[in-house]
C-alpha cells in the first residue's frame, strides 16, 4: 500500500529542498525582524535568477553575512565587500552585494522610525495575512498594488533591489499574503 502524497503548489516540483521550503516556510507569517531581513536579502539576490539557486546558496549567505545580522552588515566596509565578491558560495554581483550593505543601513533607519521592520511592512496588508484563492498557478500575479506601494516607499527610503515583483515575492515568502493554491495542503495551514 502506497502512501498518497499531499497536493502541493506546482512550483514546488520534485526537488527536496524546494519541497521542504514550500512545506515548512513559504507563506508562514513572519514578524521577526532578523528573519524578515534574511528574506529581503535573499529575494534581492534572486533578481534575474531562479529561487532554487538562492535556496541552494542560503547557508553560504548565512555564513558570509554573519547570520543576516543587519547591525553587523551595516558596518561592512570596502574590504568586506571585496571579501564577499570573492566568495563562490554566494551570488558575486557587486550591485547586489553593495545593496545588502545599503539595505542593512536603511533597515536600521526604518527600525528607528517605525519600531521594527515588521511594523513598517505588515501595515501594507493591514497587519494580517491576505488570503487569496488561486486555483491555477497562472492566476497568481507578479505583483499587486500593495507590493507596488511598499516597493515605492522602500525605494524612497533608500532600499535597493526592491522592485514590486521582488517585494511581492517577499510578501509571499513571509506570509503577508497566502498564495498557496486552494487545493494545496498548506493553504489552510498558513
Image: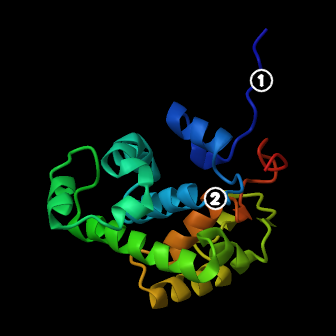
Farthest bottom residue? Answer: 156
Q: Nearer the viewer, residue 180 or 136?
A: 180
Crowding at mark 2 (Cα within 10 Å: few <14, some 14-19, many 20+): many
Residue 172 position in % (x across, y down): 64, 62
> Between marks 2 and 1, how big is the CA–CA gap?
28 Å
Check the image and report above or below for 42 versus 47: above
Residue 144 quadrant? bottom right
Please identify the quadrant where the N terminus is shown.
top right
Residue 5, located in which quarter of the rendered image? top right
| Disc marking residue 174 | 2
Residue at the image position 35 percent from the left and 43 percent from the top: 63
Residue sitting nearer the eye, 138 or 45? 45
Query: Residue pushed farthest right?
Result: 188
Q: Residue at x 70, y 72 (%)?
A: 122
Q: Which residue is mark 1?
A: 4
Q: Which mark is residue 78?
A: none
Q: Name the mark nearer the viewer: 2 or 1.
A: 2
Q: Residue at x 64, y 50 (%)?
A: 26
Q: Residue 9: x, y in percent?
A: 67, 47
Is residue 18 visible in the rendered image? The answer is: yes
Residue 37 vs 2, above or below: the answer is below
Q: Quadrant of residue 47?
A: bottom left
Task: Tell me which residue sits at (79%, 41%) in the image.
Answer: 185
Residue 17 vertical position relative to residue 113 in the rendered view, above or below: above
Q: Is residue 3 above or below residue 33?
A: above
Amino acid at each position: 500500500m502506497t502512501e498518497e502524497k499531499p497536493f502541493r503548489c506546482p512550483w514546488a516540483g520534485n526537488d527536496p529542498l524546494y519541497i521542504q521550503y514550500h512545506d515548512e516556510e513559504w507563506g508562514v507569517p513572519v514578524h521577526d525582524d532578523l528573519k524578515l531581513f534574511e528574506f529581503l536579502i535573499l529575494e534581492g539576490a534572486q533578481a534575474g535568477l531562479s529561487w532554487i539557486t538562492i535556496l541552494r546558496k542560503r547557508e553560504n549567505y548565512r555564513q558570509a553575512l554573519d547570520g543576516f545580522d543587519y547591525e553587523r552588515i551595516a558596518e561592512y566596509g570596502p574590504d568586506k565587500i571585496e571579501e564577499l565578491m570573492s566568495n563562490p558560495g554566494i551570488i558575486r554581483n557587486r550591485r547586489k552585494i553593495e545593496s545588502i550593505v545599503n539595505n542593512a543601513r536603511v533597515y536600521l533607519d526604518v527600525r528607528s522610525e517605525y519600531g521594527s521592520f515588521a511594523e513598517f511592512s505588515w501595515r501594507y496588508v493591514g497587519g494580517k495575512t491576505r488570503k487569496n484563492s488561486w486555483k491555477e498557478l497562472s492566476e497568481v500575479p507578479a505583483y499587486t498594488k500593495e507590493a507596488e506601494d511598499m516597493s515605492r516607499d522602500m525605494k524612497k527610503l533608500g532600499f535597493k533591489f526592491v522592485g514590486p515583483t521582488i517585494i511581492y515575492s517577499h510578501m509571499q515568502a513571509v506570509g503577508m499574503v497566502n498564495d498557496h493554491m486552494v487545493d494545496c495542503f498548506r493553504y489552510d495551514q498558513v
